Image (cartoon, rainbow, N blue to C red):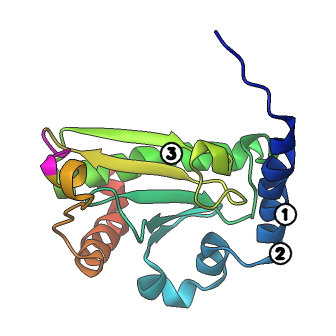
């Protein structure tokens, strides 16, 4: 393997660290949602638990793309206590069951991006993505036109998913 040395790039890389520190000073989308339970519909929150909540992705990869976040502004798994981690994973399980009922996907992508370099859009507030997937959902549109077709509005998803989370006992 060839290695290309470019030590001058360290200044560029440092800007990302500075950017992450700045983000902690600004209120993030998850903190805004956590602090405003009376604005759940507007902020796309579909369910609240004791230590975490479920929010729709405002720019979904697919219909039903959900995010599970702790109420605390924490950027790394190691900074969460076991109670929060357990509740988040149980919420993933419930959300997956609800998405299965509502959208009948053929599969799921479930994951966590830690840090901007790993794809985290909000690197200072950890969250778990749950993305329903269907056979053939990677069609020619994203490949050729850089367009993703999402056929259900966020408002309709909000209504359907919130209703199902209110009936969560049916999934346990």
- Of the numbered discs in the image, which one, if any, rests on residue 21? 1
- Of the numbered discs in the image, which one, if any, rests on residue 90? 3
Mark 1 residue crowding within 10 angstroms, few (<14) / some (14–19) / many (20+): few
Does 154 sit above or below residue 121? below
> In the structure shown, which secondary structural element does the residue marked by tag 3 occupy?
helix
Does 107 sit above or below residue 143? above
Which quadrant is the N terminus positioned in?
Answer: top right
Whether residue 155 is visible, yes or no, is: yes
Residue 51 as seen in the image, left or right of residue 154 = right
Cβ–Cβ under 8 Å for marks 1 and 2:
yes
Which residue is depicted at the point 80% across and 43% down?
9
Residue 138 location (% of width, % of height): 20, 44
- Of the numbered discs in the image, which one, if any, rests on residue 86? none
Q: Which residue is mark 2?
A: 25
Between disc 3 and disc 1, whose residue precedes?
1
Residue 45 location (% of width, % of height): 46, 74
């Amino acid at each position: 393997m060839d290695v290309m040395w470019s030590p001058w790039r360290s200044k560029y890389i440092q800007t990302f660290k500075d950017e992450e520190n700045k983000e902690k000073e600004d209120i993030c989308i998850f903190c805004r949602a956590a602090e405003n339970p009376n604005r759940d519909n507007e902020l796309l929150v579909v369910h609240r638990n004791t230590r975490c909540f479920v929010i729709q992705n405002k720019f979904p990869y697919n219909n039903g793309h959900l995010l599970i976040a702790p109420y605390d502004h924490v950027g790394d798994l190691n900074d969460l206590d076991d109670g929060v981690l357990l509740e988040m994973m149980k919420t993933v399980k419930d959300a997956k069951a609800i998405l299965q009922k509502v959208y009948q996907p053929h599969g799921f992508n479930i994951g966590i991006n830690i840090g901007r370099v790993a794809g985290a859009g909000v690197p200072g507030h950890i969250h778990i993505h749950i993305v329903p997937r269907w056979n053939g959902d990677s069609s020619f549109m994203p490949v050729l036109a850089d367009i993703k077709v999402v056929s259900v509005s966020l408002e309709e998803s909000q209504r359907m998913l919130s209703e199902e989370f209110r009936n969560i006992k049916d999934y346990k």
